Image (tube, rainbow, N blue to C red):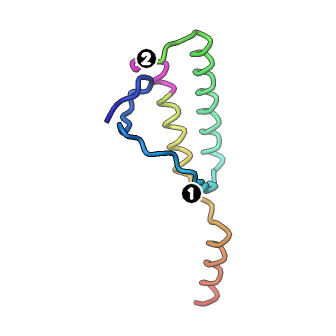
Amino acid sequence: MAATATTGFPIPAAAPAVSLVRPVVRRRRISPRDGRALEILGHAIEYLTDEFVHEGGSLAPGNPQVQAIQLLMALNRQVYLDCPPVPSFGERCRALLRQFAA
């Protein structure tokens, strides 16, 4: 695996072709507490990236500003993905039918 020059994260040397199939996007049930955490993290990410661009920072792998932004983005994803997905219409219908069948 090779590492990109900007992030330092490993990527496969022969990356697969981009698929034209759209991924399934699941809505999440976000509690007020998680929503507030996502809002705060989003503002922090926006602030740090604005400062980074304003200062003309470099995308060197060891740049602490870039690492801080990446850390906040990872936390943002973690909070979002920890929220339970909203069942689809089909899943709700199947659950309702199972209740009536029982």
Image position of 16 (left or right of 41) = left
Return the x and y of residue 81 as percentages of the image width and height.
53, 49
Image position of 95 (left or right of 13) = right
Task: Specify whether residue 70 is painted magenta.
Answer: no
Q: Residue 60, located in which quarter of the rendered image? A: top left
Q: Residue at x 57, y 10 (%)?
A: 56
Residue at the farthest bottom position = 101
Q: Residue at x 48, y 29 (%)?
A: 70
State the residue position of label 1. 84
| Residues packed near mark 1 inside 10 Å, few (<14), some (14 to 19) or many (20 plus) | few
Q: Residue at x 38, y 27 (%)?
A: 8
Q: Nearer the viewer, mark 2 or mark 1?
A: 2
Q: Nearer the viewer, residue 21 or 3?
A: 21
Mark 2 or mark 1, earlier in chain: 2
- Indicate the quadrant containing the N terminus: top left, top right, bottom left or bottom right: top left
State the residue position of label 2. 60
Q: Which residues are magenta?
A: 61-69
Return the x and y of residue 58 as percentages of the image width and height.
49, 13
Return the x and y of residue 31 as percentages of the image width and height.
63, 50
- In this rendering, the answer to whether 92 lies above or below 9 is below
What amino acid is labelled 1 in the image?
Answer: Pro
Question: Dot 1 lies on which element?
Answer: loop
